[in-house]
Amino acid sequence: MKVAVLTSSRADYGIYRPLLELLEKDSFFDLNLLVFGTHLSLKFGNTIENIYADGFNIAEKIDTMPTGDSPAEISFSIGKTIEEFSKVWYKHNFDLVIALGDRYEMFAAVSSTIPFNLKIAHIHGGETTLGAIDNSFRHSITLMSDIHFTAAEEYRKRVIEIIGNDKNVYNTGALSIDNIKLTQLFTLVQFKEKFGIDLSIPSILFTFHPETVEFEKNTFFINEIICALAELKAYQIIITMPNSDTMGLQIRSELNKFIEKNANVIGVESFGSLGYLTCIKHCSMLLGNTSSGFIEAAGFDKPVVNLGNRQKGRIITPNIFNSKIKKDEIINAISKAASYSSSKETKIYGNGKAAEEMIKYLKNYANR
């Protein structure tokens, strides 16, 4: 089976890793990575270098990055991605294309396959994020796909509702749990040597992506967040930068100004999967509105202060403390999260064998 895997960012590549390793080792599969989006951007860390370092076969590099972060530039990038990928599908003959998640560039790449009648396997369908335009993209990818691998049973049921049948819809659990179970994380000493950050200090891992449904409110949101962060002197605050979304560059600019003025605040473009998981494991809590605050944080049973509506609609496990994006409410939620102990109810995203399950179902699908 000649398989193409779509990867557009550090985030999806880190999640894919357990599956990529099994696909690479299994002679049944011919693995080809199609690399695009922020992977090819120096501003976003040029993370294609991580893929080269891991030794996976990069079949194509496709330049699809928007020049800015306005709605018009994001829309133009969607069109450009469709156009550029039409050339890829014309050039190659793939038996299956694997797509993960809900990003606008992932939607565009999958959309371009439809005239070519390519088979799509979608990972992380059925989830809901009402505060992001990604919600529409995710469900659209689901409708365009032939095989579905969901992270939880609730999401499997939603995919069935969306497509109208249960054919090839599987709850495999999340690949991120495989990463947690299988990856030898950095020790505190190794992490400090590599990144210059001491995780033995009480730390908050912060990531805030734009709310793209009501993007005009992001200026207010980032100002409220920075006012809250400024009062957290008892913590080391580790900031990872936002996605390439509408108004993402403005948020990035405000965060960089804040980092420069505060000694207890550290900015990181990209830890890579190993570094990021290590940081989650050892930090006091996560703060922001990233999907890793739901799945990866649940895998470590780590408290999370989830801000605003970007992730609204996801399953809320006991480790998650929701907060409106207002200074005083954020500080109050952080205080509550600091007293969190643990809960078995966070373990809803599988047993760390999602990649094995996906391989099994892909082979069954190929042999029909």
Image: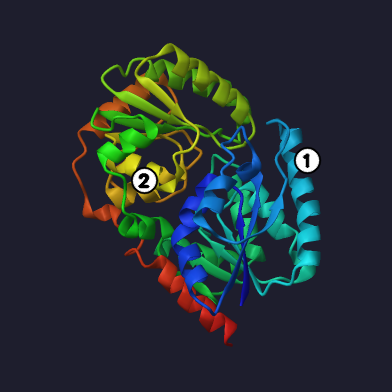
Tell me the SS state at disc 2. helix
Residue at the extreme bottom of the image, as rendered: 368
- Would you identify the image quadrant in which residue 95 lies? bottom right
Amino acid carrying mark 2 in the image: Leu
Residue 46 appears left or right of 194: right
Q: Is residue 213 visible?
A: yes
Residue 84 appears left or right of 171: right
Amino acid carrying mark 1 in the image: Phe
Q: Is residue 128 above or below residue 225?
A: below
Q: What residue do we see at 36% from left, 24% from top?
A: 329
Q: Earlier in the sequence, mark 1 or mark 2?
A: 1
Residue behind mark 2 = 277
- Name the spot of residue 71 as percent of width and height, x first: 72, 34
Residue at the extreme top of the image, as rendered: 261
Task: Identify the image quadrant of the C terminus.
Answer: bottom right
Q: Is residue 316 visible?
A: no
Q: What residue do we see at 48% from left, 32% from top?
A: 208
Q: Which-is-in-front pick, marks 1 and 2?
A: 2
Tell me the SS state at disc 1. helix
Q: Which mark is residue 76?
A: 1
Task: Identify the image quadrant of the N terminus.
Answer: bottom right
Q: Which mark is residue 349?
A: none
From the viewer's side, name the closer residue of 223 and 105: 105
Q: Residues within 10 Å of mark 2 (few under 14, many from 20)?
A: many
From the viewer's side, name the closer residue of 74 and 138: 74
- Would you identify the image quadrant in which residue 2 lies? bottom right
- Name the spot of residue 353 as percent of width and height, x first: 37, 67
